[in-house]
Image: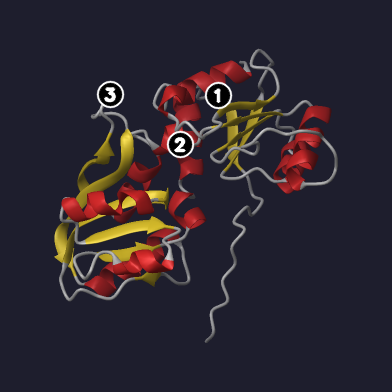
Amino acid sequence: MTVKDILNCITEVAPLQWQESYDNAGLQVGDLNAEARKALVCLDITEEVVDEAIAKGCDLIVSHHPLIFHGLKHLTPETYIERAVMKAVKHDVAMISMHTNLDNSYLGVSRVLAERLGLKNLHLLQPSEAEPELCGAGMIGEFENPMGETAFLGLVAEAIGSPCLRHSALTGRSIKKVALCGGSGSPFMQDALRQKADAYLTADIKYHDFFIPEGNVLLVDGGHFETEQFTKELIVELIRKKFPTFAAEIAETRTNAVYYFVNK
């Protein structure tokens, strides 16, 4: 088994050409032809994740977010990115990242979140022109039975394991049709409005963007990590489906950089 074999099994459902122009998905560190015996899967790569990989004998880390997003001009101990890369190279740990190519896959990040909420009749929120059935941003679907807004907020909080949610003013309407986008999905808010979604769940919504719906849709910000966390299970599932005997596991290291203080 090689690093390339693992990369290829994931790109079967999320080809690298589906990534956004600004992205850096694919091989980050290492040799595609190097042997891969065990993979550690995470949302973000930190120095602690590399330490965990080394301790567990993993020679491959598969992440959602790329560790190297912009060009590195040097490799020194100055930043956690450089230290993580240096440590990975020293211990022959390869790194691959499946970012916006997996975001844009019909079988990717947003679909997993939609299924977690129990939505049915799923289709892409903003399909691509080239492959509208397979590639695009976000997801939209429906509940079998409508529910109240507070019940919906409770469902979301429980599904993503969040202690709190940011949301716009309640609309006073039931929630049946839901649009969502795991991670930063503010650019697709207008798509949710055009398709007359009752609610739009995403993350990283700016303050002034909460005014945009004017009561036409319930905006819910569930947090970036929280709405993308199930990508880890998806990646492991894709690897195990193709290679049932290959050792792939989810990292135990916490990589959510955001903490919440809940005043009780």
Give, as a three-letter code, the residue at label 1.
Answer: Thr
Give the side of residue 17 with respect to residue 43, left or right: left
The mark closer to the camera, 2 or 3, is: 3
Q: Looking at the image, which residue is at 56% across and 41% down?
A: 65
The mark closer to the camera, 1 or 2, is: 2
Crowding around mark 3 (Cα neighbors within 10 Å: few <14, some 14 to 19, many 20+) is: few
Q: CA distance from mark 2 to mark 3?
A: 16 Å
Crowding around mark 1 (Cα neighbors within 10 Å: few <14, some 14 to 19, many 20+) is: few
What SS does tag 1 mark? loop
Res 25 quadrant in image:
top right
- Which residue is disc 2 drawn over? 100
Q: Looking at the image, which residue is at 46% across and 24% down?
A: 16
In terms of depth relative to the viewer, which is nearer, 207 or 168?
Answer: 207
Residue 66 showing in the rendered view: yes
The reply to whether the C-beta atoms of the residues labelled 3 and 1 are less than 8 Å apart is no
- Which residue is disc 3 drawn over? 130
Give the side of residue 92 with respect to residue 164, left or right: right
Give, as a three-letter code, the residue at label 3.
Answer: Ala
Q: Looking at the image, which residue is at 27% across and 67% down?
A: 152
Q: Looking at the image, which residue is at 25% across and 64% down?
A: 213
What SS does tag 2 mark? helix
Residue at the limit of the structure toward the bottom, as seen here = 264
- Which residue is disc 1 drawn over? 245
Q: Position of residue 37 (x, y in %)?
A: 66, 23
Q: Of callouts 2 and 3, which one flags the residue occurring earlier in the amino acid sequence?
A: 2
What SS does tag 3 mark? loop
